[in-house]
């Protein structure tokens, strides 16, 4: 009896340690990701998230963050072809996250972001903005309280030329809605996605100045 | 502190420090692409079931420090490649070099490119984007005209259809989603170019083969053009098109996993023709109504149902010289209905079924002077295709089709009342089977066999086909293709003689493609084609061709070059095509084997497009040039010894992105023959009374010297 108790206890401890390892590894890597400003660094972070995902197997967040890290790389790139290749990697990671949790609003938001990042020339605008909006609509159906939906919608409108129905003035109410939801949003864990808040605030500040 | 506690702390701290006390193992090495031998930057190298790992640097080199905990497994992985695992026994500091091969299913696997041109988003063999069809200057949104800037095709400004590698216009078969589109062009009247029936906006991909195509396709001696229609639309959209020659209104409704769209248009060349100088003497200008509706629905297991129906009705009349100094009035009216429906679904994990059916009804009323001809043509096809991916290396495609064509024509002489009728129909059964075998990521082999049986000519034919591709380096492919191709005689011929048999061609193709569509791409192909059993005959009293047998034969051989560059100059995209063809044949009423009238030995085209951001416009130029075509002057002792002048046309276009009433709008301006050159396309023999010695020659010129097209396309969503 005693032996069994010890066995169960040690099993629970090892399980807890493993979970704690996961949480702490994720927390540390996420922090590094938000602070990284270089493509090389972000690429190795994306790879680390992938490794965590491959080890944990059934968790979607590592793949989600791997995809998000690849998307972050594209902010530092200019060549359309390299951007496409990097987004292909992001897409393959998101596909894994999506397969594990297809009804997670955050996954669809990230899908919308990947599509809009593919608009590297004006001729692509129509196709990918339609795809991006479609993904964001899906995300909204799953959780309309997710602030990142409104942040991405705002970004899409902000970067669409005013003559095609975009521009700062039209984006403003969307940023405001995002800002409001960021205040009330309840992340399900410490490692839940957090991105979008700072940029929402800085965009609102810069629109306000104009 | 007592001794016991101390020892406990000691024991604990020993365990805590244990990992760092153990020896570290340093593993390093080089990760390379198995195919190219080049380093793979950014590949993941990590210890199985742990978070420990690293990525390779720009040269593909890595260095990984791991605690020596006995046996462990290293995984090397890279997106689009097959992962490799390596066991590590212990503290051996030896370099571990790994070669990764591309996943065979990935898009980068070697593709057979011989003879084929694809326009699609993600195909390795693609040489065009779907947008190119719109933005090629001078194409006026016509699929065929845009494809004529690719090598292997003839300019043939008096035809408008696709003439490929020494073949005439009847030798190209057009399919929509894999099933027959029997009348893809508006009806053709002599000397005037015709246009494709289908708007490029209906399609998201185009597969154009100039020879050596898969056993899936038959009844084409030279070429197949497969149009892939759009999937389920994702956005509700209303579009309004206002053009200098007419207008079109379209709307798309989107539901859950389904979409429905409807388009209606009206075209009238009258106002335009009255503004510009025209070579034609019009009675009634070209006028046409058209419309189409389509429905798409996605279902379970990736199934997709598509339904499309289109119809049009229109006519034109004009005067042409009859060759004896008199004018002859040509009056043509006609209508067409086309229905196409397809269904795809997976039957098992490994087998996909594609089924489809199409129906075409075409009605023409053609009057030339006192001659009246009413023609009705029906063509339907039902086809089933199964694709089995047996394993990652072997794919089998097999299926069958039934095609029924019927023809009913009544000729009447308006003055005498003399009339004759011709009616016949043909059932053509076919079956095919093909394997695509990837012996290696670098080698693909595609043998196939096709069987066809025509009830009309009571012939059973087998056509063997084979193609092969080898990858050499990261983006270079060598391809070879060979095959036998059969085609029954066209209806226009069969009406006078139903005894003629199928015509035959044999293709040999050797090609090289290197580079990528995103940057620069080069392709060169050499081919040889043998024609046999070509239809021979005479022109009858009505000036129409009446076959007498299959006594003809011929050959076509040549070289095609294609170069496209998007990276040389920022925002500039250009391509150059050059084709050389040497072809002779004895067919129709030719007394001997000569180069036929529709062949220009040298064809050159240059297409350039530049996006100019400050004015939000794309500016395009297209230059097409071909050397003269042969012609025969009736009465000459030797046949077909003259050559027409060279042809040259420089077209320009401008697409301006803007907004009208807050809606996305494209203004499109296109001008053909900017330099105002007087082109002579060729000369046509006209037999006055079916007597070769009494015939005369008509000069064929472009219908309009210069065409100006202005269109405003508004998208409302």
Image (tube, coloured by chain):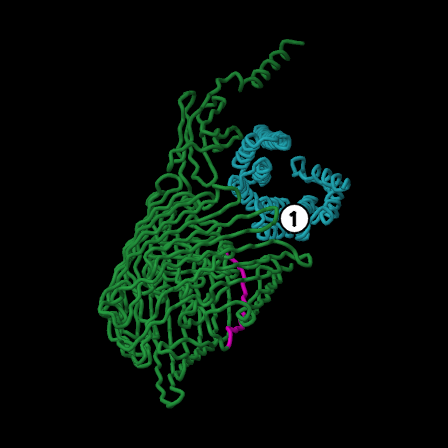
Chain colours: A cyan, B green
The residue shown at (56%, 50%) is A123
Segment colored magenta: B284-303
User: Which quadrant of the figure has residue B192?
Assistant: bottom left
Q: Mark 1 points at which residue?
A: A160
Nearer to us in this view, B610 or B142 = B610
Q: Position of residue B8 (x, y in %)?
A: 61, 15
Q: Is mark 1 on a helix, strand or loop?
A: loop
In the picture, measured across the screen, residue A30 lies left or right of residue B349, that is right
Compared with B704, B209 (above or below) is above
Nearer to us in this view, B351 or B234 = B234
Compared with B557, B614 (above or below) is above
Nearer to us in this view, B22 or B551 = B551
Q: In this rendering, does residue B710 appear at all? A: yes
Compared with B76, A157 (above or below) is below
Q: Where is residue B467 in the image (x, y as percent from the top left)?
A: 31, 52
Q: Where is residue B268 in the image (x, y as percent from the top left)?
A: 54, 71
């Amino acid at each position: 009896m005693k032996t069994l108790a010890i066995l169960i206890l040690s099993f629970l401890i090892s399980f807890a340690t493993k979970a704690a390892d996961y949480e702490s590894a994720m927390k540390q890597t996420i922090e590094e990701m938000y602070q990284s400003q270089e493509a090389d660094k972000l690429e190795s972070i994306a790879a680390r998230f992938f490794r965590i995902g491959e080890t944990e197997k059934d968790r979607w967040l590592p793949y989600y963050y791997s995809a998000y890290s690849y998307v972050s790389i594209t902010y530092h790139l200019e060549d359309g072809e390299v951007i496409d290749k990097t987004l292909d990697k992001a897409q393959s990671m998101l596909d894994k996250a999506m397969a594990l949790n297809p009804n997670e609003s955050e996954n669809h938001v990230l899908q919308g972001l990947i599509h809009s990042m593919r608009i590297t020339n004006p001729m692509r605008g129509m196709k990918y903005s339609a795809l991006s909006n479609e993904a964001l609509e899906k995300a909204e159906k799953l959780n309309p309280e997710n602030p990142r939906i409104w942040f991405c919608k705002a970004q899409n409108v902000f970067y669409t030329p005013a003559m095609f129905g975009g521009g700062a003035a039209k984006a403003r109410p969307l940023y405001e809605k995002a800002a409001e939801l960021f205040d009330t949003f309840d992340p399900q864990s410490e490692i839940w996605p957090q991105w979008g808040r700072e940029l929402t605030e800085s965009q609102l500040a810069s629109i306000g100045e104009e | 502190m007592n001794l016991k506690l101390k020892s406990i702390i000691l024991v604990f701290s020993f365990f805590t420090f244990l990992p760092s006390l153990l020896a570290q193992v340093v593993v390093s090495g080089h990760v390379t692409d198995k195919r190219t031998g080049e380093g793979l930057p950014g590949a993941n190298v990590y210890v199985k079931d742990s978070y420990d790992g690293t990525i390779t640097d720009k040269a593909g080199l890595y260095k990984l420090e791991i605690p020596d905990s006995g046996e462990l497994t290293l995984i090397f992985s890279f997106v689009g490649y097959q992962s490799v695992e390596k066991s590590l026994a212990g503290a051996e500091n030896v370099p571990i070099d790994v070669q990764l091969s591309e996943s065979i299913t990935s898009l980068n696997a070697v593709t057979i490119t011989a003879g084929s041109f694809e326009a699609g988003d993600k195909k390795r063999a693609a040489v065009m984007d779907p947008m190119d069809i719109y933005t090629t200057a001078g194409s006026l949104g016509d699929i065929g005209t845009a494809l004529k800037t690719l090598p292997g095709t003839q300019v043939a400004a008096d035809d408008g259809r696709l003439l490929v590698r020494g073949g005439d216009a009847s030798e190209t078969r057009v399919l929509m989603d894999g099933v027959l589109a029997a009348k893809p062009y508006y009806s053709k009247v002599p000397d005037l170019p015709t246009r494709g029936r289908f708007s490029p906006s209906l399609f998201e991909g185009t597969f154009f083969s100039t020879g050596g195509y898969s056993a899936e396709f038959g009844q084409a001696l030279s070429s197949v053009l497969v149009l892939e229609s759009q999937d389920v639309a994702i956005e509700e959209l209303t579009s309004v098109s206002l053009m200098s020659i007419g207008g079109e209104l379209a709307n798309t409704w989107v539901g859950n996993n389904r979409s429905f769209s409807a388009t209606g248009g009206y075209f009238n060349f009258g106002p335009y023709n009255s503004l510009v100088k025209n070579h034609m003497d019009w009675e009634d200008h070209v006028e046409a109504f058209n419309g189409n509706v389509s429905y798409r629905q996605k279902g379970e297991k990736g199934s997709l149902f598509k339904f499309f129906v289109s119809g049009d009705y229109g006519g034109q009349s004009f005067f042409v010289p009859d060759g004896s100094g008199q004018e002859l009035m040509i009056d043509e009216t006609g209508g067409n209905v086309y229905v196409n429906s397809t269904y795809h679904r997976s039957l098992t994990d490994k087998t996909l079924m594609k089924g489809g059916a199409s129906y075409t009804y075409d009605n023409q009323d053609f009057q030339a002077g006192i001659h009246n001809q009413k023609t009705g043509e029906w063509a339907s096809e039902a086809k089933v295709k199964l694709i089995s991916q047996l394993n990652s290396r072997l794919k089998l495609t097999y299926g069958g089709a039934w095609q029924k064509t019927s023809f009913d024509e009544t000729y009447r002489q308006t003055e005498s009342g003399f009339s004759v009728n011709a009616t016949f129909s043909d059932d053509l059964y076919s079956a095919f089977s093909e394997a695509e075998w990837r012996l290696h990521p670098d080698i693909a082999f595609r043998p196939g066999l096709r069987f066809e049986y025509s009830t009309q000519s009571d012939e059973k034919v087998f056509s063997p086909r084979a193609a092969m591709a080898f990858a050499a380096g990261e983006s270079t492919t060598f391809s070879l293709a060979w095959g036998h191709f059969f085609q029954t005689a066209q209806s226009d011929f069969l009406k006078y003689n139903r005894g003629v048999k199928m015509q035959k061609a044999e293709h040999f193709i050797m090609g090289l493609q290197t580079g990528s569509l995103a940057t620069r791409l080069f392709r060169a192909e050499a081919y040889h084609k043998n024609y046999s059993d070509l239809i021979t005959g005479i022109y009858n009293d009505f000036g129409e061709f009446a076959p007498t047998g299959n006594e003809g034969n011929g050959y076509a051989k040549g070289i095609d070059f294609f170069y496209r560059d998007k990276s040389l100059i920022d925002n500039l995209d250009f391509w150059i095509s050059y084709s050389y063809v040497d072809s002779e044949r004895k067919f129709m009423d030719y007394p001997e084997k000569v180069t036929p009238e529709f062949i220009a030995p040298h064809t050159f085209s240059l297409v350039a497009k530049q996006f100019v951001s400050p004015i939000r416009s794309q500016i395009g130029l297209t230059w097409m040039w071909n050397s003269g075509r042969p012609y025969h002057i009736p009465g000459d002792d030797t046949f077909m010894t003259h050559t027409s002048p060279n042809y040259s046309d420089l077209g320009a276009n401008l697409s301006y992105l803007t907004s009208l009433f807050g809606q996305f709008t494209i203004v499109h301006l296109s001008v053909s023959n900017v330099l105002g050159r007087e082109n002579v396309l060729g000369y046509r023999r006209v037999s006055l009374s079916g007597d070769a010695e009494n015939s005369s020659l008509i000069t064929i010129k472009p219908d309009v010297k210069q065409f100006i097209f202005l269109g405003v396309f508004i998208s409302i969503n």
